[in-house]
Structure formats: structure tokens, C-alpha cells
Amino acid sequence: MSWKRNYFASGSSGLPGIFTPRTMTSIAPSKGLINEPGQNSCFLNSALQVLWHLDIFRRSFRQLTTHKCMEDSCIFCALKSIFVQFQFSSEKVLPSDALRCALAKTFQDEQRFQLGIMDDAAECFENILMRIHFHISDETKEDICTAKHCIPHQKFAMTLFEQCVCSNCGASSDPLPFIQMVHYISTTSLCNQAVRMLECREKPTPDMFGELLRNASTVGDLRNCPGNCGEKLRIRRVLMNSPEIITIGLVWDSDHSDLAEDVIHSLGTVLRLGDLFYRVTEDKAKQAELYLVGVVCYYGKHYSTFFFQTKIRKWIYFDDAHVKEVIIWALCNQ
């Protein structure tokens, strides 16, 4: 799931929760992506639809003209090619083969994203972003990149440190800095925490969703007190930047989970950065509200995607070659 900054003002559609963009953007009509039997490319097609429909990424990526090319395994070139087709092709359904082949060659040693084999859409999305960093950032390490033109780190990356602080003895662990493109949370923890939070409140509040995600991401992750006083401590994660796009990956504990309906009812459409982490350091992040614009779904060993298309102000459903408009309540019933 992807949230982005508030580029929307209250709309005139008459429906609560629908937002109207302040400025109209130029984007070609939505196109589907081919997934022939045996290709198992639905995970890649879903990641591609998210990247293309994220206005922030699409516009920024269009401006990039130079890169470190890896020829037939160049993810940058393959992504540029499919984006040109999204924009200018008269075809309603496009092939994603070039990017699929580039991914397979790039990750051959790790045996990830290989041709004909199903893989994980969130990890595909994350790895495409990191390969873009590789192609444009002059060998800069992933965890220290500050290049202004690096879209993954400037737009998506969450720069964090985690630390344990004991309220009993006052001891604290050394802060551990890291960067993540996707914030992963267990669906079981999410649902359990939602029940506990609702037991303590008469009704949900606007800030509940961020708090829910924060609690779910640390539940069960207890550490020993660094001062060895015997206390068990929850980890504290502090956000040190203000990303424009936040991506949440929900991790299912089994292939046959019965929590799907509970997860849907736990989701919110507005996310405050200040609620998602123990603390945020930038004033911009403290005030930031992000709105849900994309959801990648996995059901029956198949990926599909919902995305809010800003030009037509509607949610669109992408199931490989099939593209259709959906009304907002249908998003919750899929």
C-alpha cells in the first residue's frame, strides 16, 4: 500500500473520503500489462502500475536522462521503455517482458525474479527502486545516499534509527541507523492491536491508524535492557526525514489466513507521519499527512492493484491486461 502527501483538496463529488487534486496532471489513459499463461508476471505488473501512477515518481523519473547502463540487464532502460509506451502507445495492453528479463538477469545469482517463477510484488517494487539508485547515484552506498537526483532516497526512503531506552534504570542502547523503502508489518499483529485499541476507545479517531501501525510494528519485539536491569523493552524507531511517499507492506503469516476481512476494516486512508513512529525529528514530518493512493492485493496466488488516478479522480483496478474503473466502496469489498 502506498500513501503520498496531501496534493488533494476536498472534492465536490458528494462522497466522503473522495479527494480532488488541486492541479490536473497530464497522464495517458490507463493501460493493462500482458501476463500470458506460465509467465507469472502479475507481481511485476502490479509494481509497475504503482510506479507509473505515482505522479511524484513518474514526473521525477521522466527528468532523468543519464545513468550507468547495464545493457541487456539494465532495469533503468527497461523502465524508461515501458514508461514511454504507457505515455504514447496506442495499444491498450502492453508487454512488460523487457523489464522482466532485465530483473531476471540482474538477480540471477540470488535466484530472485526469475522468468516464469512467481515472486513477491512488494520486494519487486523495493528492488526496482534500489536498482534505480544503483544506476544513477555513482556507486554511493544505499544507506548513505544524499544525492538530490536520487528519486528512491529523496521521495521514498525512510531514514530511521532504532534504540532501546529503559525507564527503570535509565540505560539506553546505541542508536542503530538504517534506511527502508517499505515498512513491513504483520497482519496478525495489526488485527490484534486493532482489537485492543478499540476496547479502550468509544470510536476510532483520525490518528488511530498511524498509532495502530506503530504498535503493530513493535509488538512482540522485546529487547533486554542494555543496562541488564532485567526489564524487557520495546524498540523505539525515530524518523529523521520526511519522505513524500510511504509504502507499507502487510506480511501474512500463512497462505490461508482468515484475517482478510479484519485487515480491511483495520485500514485507514489517512496516515500521519508523526503517529507512525515513536518520534519524528523534522518539523515538516511532524505536520505531514499522507493519503492512500494505491493498494496491491494478493489472493489466490495472484496479484492485482487498485490505484487512485488523479486526472479522472477515480479508483482504477488493474488485473494484468484487465483495467476497469471502480467506485470507492468496491475497494473494500474485493
Image (cartoon, helix red, strand yellow):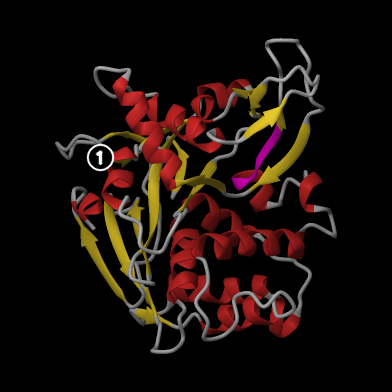
Q: Start and end of the magenta stretch? A: 156-161
- Quadrant of the image occupied by residue 79: bottom right
Q: Secondary structure at mark 1?
A: loop
In the picture, which quadrant includes the C terminus? bottom left
| Dominant secondary-structure state across the stretch colored magenta | strand
- Quadrant of the image occupied by residue 94: bottom left
Does 315 lie within the magenta span? no
Quickly name the residue at label 1: 18
Q: Given the current orientation, which residue lies at the most extreme bottom position?
A: 37
Asked whether, in this view, residue 157 is left or right of residue 32, the answer is right
Q: Is residue 240 among what the camera can see?
A: no
**Residue 70: x and y, percent?**
76, 78
Q: Is residue 166 among what the camera can see?
A: yes
**Residue 163: x and y, percent?**
72, 27
Q: How many callouts does the rendering have? A: 1
Q: Give the answer, above or below, for where 148 lies relative to 41.
A: above
**Residue 12: x and y, percent?**
19, 36
Instruction: Say which amino acid is labelled 1.
Output: Ile
Q: Give the answer, above or below, for where 175 lies relative to 263.
A: above
Which residue is pictured at 76% across the width and 62% down the height?
Answer: 134
Q: Residues within 10 Å of mark 1 (few under 14, many from 20)?
A: some
Which residue is pictured at 36% across the width and 32% down the height?
Answer: 194
- Quadrant of the image occupied by residue 76: bottom right
Q: Nearer the viewer, residue 93 or 260?
A: 260
Q: Give the answer, above or below, for where 273 lies relative to 85.
A: above
Asked whether, in this view, residue 220 is left or right of residue 197, the answer is right
Which residue is pictured at 38% across the width and 54% down the height?
Answer: 295
Q: Given the current orientation, which residue lies at the most extreme left position?
A: 14
Q: Nearer the viewer, residue 315 or 171?
A: 171
**Residue 73: x and y, percent?**
70, 80
Q: Nearer the viewer, residue 302 or 58?
A: 302
